[in-house]
């Protein structure tokens, strides 16, 4: 069939997604979307552990409050400017290729209301939440 055609069957053209970004020592210094510089005392492993704990906590929440909980966590912890964007602290509508292949691979697999696994991109460690 049509595997690997970019616009794969069933994949949305755009999604609305929020994320918590934890930058760690060694992340790209130049990140115009960063809210603050990487934490020089945080290793990649520590960032991943912190997000995994967060993921476990959020998965225990009822679906109807998960979005609000996720937004609250973004505002508190995320190193991305999107944390201050809106009530949902989201990246807005995202299209494939906008945030890189690691991001796309996780984000476009999610159903609305689902959380991703922890992913690593050149920007840092992310936990994604699909809003729409």
Image (cartoon, rainbow, N blue to C red):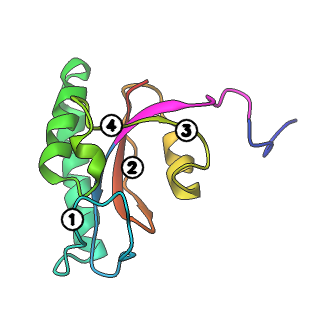
Within 10 Å of disc 4 (Cα), the crowding (few <14, some 14-19, many 20+) is many
Give the total of numbered labels: 4
First in sequence: mark 1 vs mark 2: 1
First in sequence: mark 4 vs mark 3: 4
Q: Nearer the viewer, residue 97 or 57?
A: 97
Cα distance between the residues tagged 4 and 2: 17 Å
Cα distance between the residues tagged 3 and 1: 27 Å
Instruction: Report helix, strand or loop for mark 1.
Output: loop
Q: Relative to 53, does residue 83 appear above or below in the rendering?
A: above
Compared across the picture, whether 83 is left or right of 126 comes to left
The residue at the point 63 percent across, 30 percent down is 13
Residue at the spot of label 3: 108
Range drawn in magenta: 8-18
Disc sitting over residue 117 in the figure: 2
Q: Residues at badges 4 and 1 in contact (C-beta under 8 Å)?
A: no
Residue 39 lies in quadrant:
bottom left
The residue at the point 36 percent across, 75 percent down is 27
Q: Relative to 58, does residue 68 appear above or below in the rendering?
A: above
Q: Nearer the viewer, mark 4 or mark 3?
A: 4
Percent across and percent down for residue 108 are 55, 38
Q: Residues at badges 4 and 3 in contact (C-beta under 8 Å)?
A: no
Percent across and percent down for residue 78 are 22, 53
Instruction: Report helix, strand or loop for mark 4.
Output: strand
First in sequence: mark 4 vs mark 1: 1
Residue at the spot of label 4: 90
Q: Residues at badges 4 and 2 in contact (C-beta under 8 Å)?
A: no
Q: Nearer the viewer, mark 3 or mark 2?
A: 3
Percent across and percent down for residue 83 are 24, 44
Instruction: Report helix, strand or loop for mark 2.
Output: loop
Q: Nearer the viewer, residue 77 or 93?
A: 93
Residue at the spot of label 1: 36
Instruction: Report helix, strand or loop for mark 3.
Output: loop
């Amino acid at each position: 069939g049509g595997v690997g055609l970019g616009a794969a069957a069933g994949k949305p053209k755009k999604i609305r997604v929020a994320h918590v970004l934890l930058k760690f020592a060694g992340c790209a210094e130049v990140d115009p979307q960063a809210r603050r510089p990487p934490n020089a005392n945080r290793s990649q492993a520590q960032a991943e552990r912190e997000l995994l704990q967060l993921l476990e906590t959020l998965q225990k929440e009822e679906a109807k409050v998960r979005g609000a909980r996720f937004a609250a966590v973004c505002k508190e912890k995320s190193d991305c400017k999107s944390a201050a964007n809106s009530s949902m602290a989201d990246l807005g509508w995202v299209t494939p290729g906008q945030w890189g292949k690691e991001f796309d691979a996780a984000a476009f697999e999610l159903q609305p209301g689902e959380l991703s696994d922890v992913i690593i991109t050149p920007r840092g460690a992310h936990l994604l939440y699909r809003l729409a």
